[in-house]
Image (tube, helix red, strand yellow):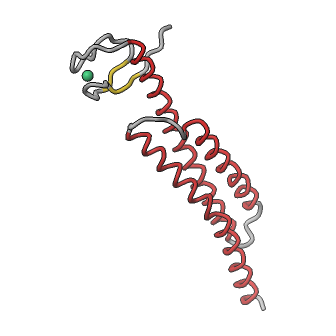
Amino acid sequence: MFETHTFPCPNCNEIINDSMRECRFCRAPIDPQAARAAGELQARVNQACSDASYTATAAYLMFAFLLLDLIPFVPFVWLAYVLTFFAVIFLIVRWQVRFGGLRTRDPDYKRALFSRNVALVLWLVAMPVWIVGHIFGAVIIAVLFR
Ligand SMILES: [Zn+2]
Protein backbone atom coordinates (compact mmCIF):
# COMPACT_ATOMS: atom_id res chain seq x y z
CA MET A 1 0.00 0.00 0.00
CA PHE A 2 1.23 3.49 -0.86
CA GLU A 3 1.87 5.53 2.25
CA THR A 4 1.09 9.24 2.09
CA HIS A 5 2.46 11.90 4.40
CA THR A 6 0.96 15.29 5.01
CA PHE A 7 3.05 18.45 4.87
CA PRO A 8 2.58 22.22 4.40
CA CYS A 9 2.51 23.47 0.80
CA PRO A 10 5.79 25.32 0.06
CA ASN A 11 3.78 28.01 -1.72
CA CYS A 12 0.72 28.68 0.48
CA ASN A 13 1.47 26.69 3.65
CA GLU A 14 -1.88 24.82 3.63
CA ILE A 15 -1.61 21.18 4.72
CA ILE A 16 -1.54 18.86 1.69
CA ASN A 17 -0.21 15.36 1.08
CA ASP A 18 2.52 13.90 -1.10
CA SER A 19 0.19 11.91 -3.38
CA MET A 20 -0.88 15.15 -5.10
CA ARG A 21 0.70 16.62 -8.22
CA GLU A 22 -0.51 20.12 -7.47
CA CYS A 23 -1.64 21.94 -4.35
CA ARG A 24 -5.43 21.75 -4.02
CA PHE A 25 -5.50 25.20 -2.41
CA CYS A 26 -3.22 27.35 -4.56
CA ARG A 27 -2.75 25.06 -7.61
CA ALA A 28 1.02 25.35 -7.38
CA PRO A 29 2.70 22.34 -9.02
CA ILE A 30 4.43 19.97 -6.60
CA ASP A 31 7.66 18.18 -7.34
CA PRO A 32 6.97 14.57 -6.24
CA GLN A 33 10.47 14.06 -4.83
CA ALA A 34 10.42 17.33 -2.86
CA ALA A 35 6.91 16.44 -1.70
CA ARG A 36 8.05 13.05 -0.43
CA ALA A 37 10.99 14.63 1.43
CA ALA A 38 8.67 17.25 2.93
CA GLY A 39 6.19 14.54 3.93
CA GLU A 40 8.88 12.47 5.61
CA LEU A 41 10.18 15.53 7.45
CA GLN A 42 6.64 16.24 8.64
CA ALA A 43 6.33 12.65 9.90
CA ARG A 44 9.59 13.09 11.85
CA VAL A 45 8.32 16.37 13.32
CA ASN A 46 5.12 14.62 14.43
CA GLN A 47 7.18 11.87 16.03
CA ALA A 48 9.39 14.49 17.71
CA CYS A 49 6.27 16.13 19.18
CA SER A 50 4.79 12.96 20.60
CA ASP A 51 8.16 11.80 22.00
CA ALA A 52 8.78 15.21 23.59
CA SER A 53 5.38 15.31 25.28
CA TYR A 54 5.96 11.74 26.52
CA THR A 55 9.33 12.85 27.93
CA ALA A 56 7.76 15.86 29.69
CA THR A 57 5.08 13.59 31.19
CA ALA A 58 7.80 11.26 32.51
CA ALA A 59 9.52 14.30 34.08
CA TYR A 60 6.27 15.37 35.81
CA LEU A 61 5.84 11.82 37.09
CA MET A 62 9.44 11.83 38.37
CA PHE A 63 8.75 15.07 40.25
CA ALA A 64 5.54 13.64 41.73
CA PHE A 65 7.50 10.64 43.05
CA LEU A 66 10.15 13.01 44.40
CA LEU A 67 7.57 15.04 46.36
CA LEU A 68 5.86 11.88 47.62
CA ASP A 69 9.21 10.58 48.80
CA LEU A 70 9.72 13.72 50.92
CA ILE A 71 6.72 12.68 53.03
CA PRO A 72 8.24 10.63 55.86
CA PHE A 73 7.40 6.95 56.24
CA VAL A 74 6.09 6.39 52.70
CA PRO A 75 8.04 3.26 51.74
CA PHE A 76 9.62 2.45 48.36
CA VAL A 77 8.70 5.73 46.62
CA TRP A 78 12.40 6.58 46.48
CA LEU A 79 12.87 3.59 44.16
CA ALA A 80 10.16 4.86 41.79
CA TYR A 81 11.81 8.27 41.90
CA VAL A 82 15.30 6.93 41.12
CA LEU A 83 13.97 4.78 38.26
CA THR A 84 12.06 7.68 36.67
CA PHE A 85 15.12 9.91 37.23
CA PHE A 86 17.19 7.65 34.98
CA ALA A 87 14.31 7.10 32.55
CA VAL A 88 13.87 10.87 32.06
CA ILE A 89 17.51 11.58 31.19
CA PHE A 90 17.50 8.56 28.87
CA LEU A 91 14.41 9.91 27.08
CA ILE A 92 15.92 13.42 26.84
CA VAL A 93 19.19 12.13 25.36
CA ARG A 94 17.35 9.82 22.95
CA TRP A 95 15.11 12.69 21.83
CA GLN A 96 18.15 14.89 21.29
CA VAL A 97 19.90 12.23 19.18
CA ARG A 98 16.83 11.52 17.05
CA PHE A 99 15.24 14.94 16.67
CA GLY A 100 17.70 17.56 17.95
CA GLY A 101 19.00 18.35 14.45
CA LEU A 102 15.69 18.61 12.59
CA ARG A 103 15.60 21.64 10.30
CA THR A 104 12.05 22.93 10.22
CA ARG A 105 10.11 26.07 11.04
CA ASP A 106 7.11 24.03 12.11
CA PRO A 107 5.54 25.63 15.23
CA ASP A 108 4.85 22.11 16.57
CA TYR A 109 8.59 21.49 16.60
CA LYS A 110 9.05 24.62 18.72
CA ARG A 111 6.52 23.21 21.17
CA ALA A 112 8.45 19.92 21.18
CA LEU A 113 11.67 21.82 22.00
CA PHE A 114 9.82 23.56 24.83
CA SER A 115 8.62 20.22 26.25
CA ARG A 116 12.19 18.90 26.08
CA ASN A 117 13.43 22.00 27.94
CA VAL A 118 10.77 21.58 30.64
CA ALA A 119 11.84 17.95 31.10
CA LEU A 120 15.52 18.94 31.21
CA VAL A 121 14.98 21.70 33.81
CA LEU A 122 12.89 19.37 36.00
CA TRP A 123 15.62 16.74 35.71
CA LEU A 124 18.39 19.22 36.59
CA VAL A 125 16.64 20.52 39.72
CA ALA A 126 15.35 17.10 40.85
CA MET A 127 18.44 15.86 42.70
CA PRO A 128 19.20 19.15 44.54
CA VAL A 129 15.51 19.44 45.57
CA TRP A 130 15.50 15.81 46.68
CA ILE A 131 18.68 16.14 48.79
CA VAL A 132 17.71 19.50 50.35
CA GLY A 133 14.20 18.16 51.00
CA HIS A 134 15.56 15.13 52.83
CA ILE A 135 17.96 17.23 54.93
CA PHE A 136 15.04 19.51 55.85
CA GLY A 137 12.87 16.49 56.63
CA ALA A 138 15.56 14.96 58.85
CA VAL A 139 16.00 18.23 60.75
CA ILE A 140 12.24 18.62 61.28
CA ILE A 141 11.92 15.01 62.52
CA ALA A 142 14.93 15.48 64.83
CA VAL A 143 13.35 18.61 66.33
CA LEU A 144 9.87 17.07 66.67
CA PHE A 145 10.97 13.78 68.23
CA ARG A 146 13.71 15.06 70.50
ZN1 LIG B 1 -0.49 25.63 -1.95
Q: Is residue 117 above or below residue 67?
A: above
Quadrant of ligand 1: it is top left
Residue 35 horizontal/vertical position (percent): 39, 18
Q: Is residue 19 above or below residue 116?
A: above
Q: What is the residue that sits farthest to the left in this orientation?
A: 26
Q: What is the residue that sits farthest to the top in this orientation?
A: 1
Quarter where residue 25 is shown: top left
**Residue 99 relative to residue 30: left or right:** right
| Residue plotted at (68% across, 52% down) | 84
**Residue 76 relative to residue 123: left or right:** right
| Residue plotted at (52% across, 33% down) | 47
Q: What is the residue that sits farthest to the bottom in this orientation?
A: 146
Residue 39 horizontal/vertical position (percent): 43, 22
| Residue plotted at (73% across, 57% down) | 82
Q: Nearer the viewer, residue 46 or 142?
A: 46
What is the number of callouts on the image?
0
Q: Nearer the viewer, residue 3 or 37?
A: 37
Q: Nearer the viewer, residue 27 or 103?
A: 103
Residue 74 horizontal/vertical position (percent): 73, 66
Quarter where residue 51 is shown: top right
| Residue plotted at (47% across, 50% down) | 114
**Residue 113 relative to residue 129: left or right:** left
Which quadrant holds the C terminus? bottom right
Residue 85 horizontal/vertical position (percent): 68, 55
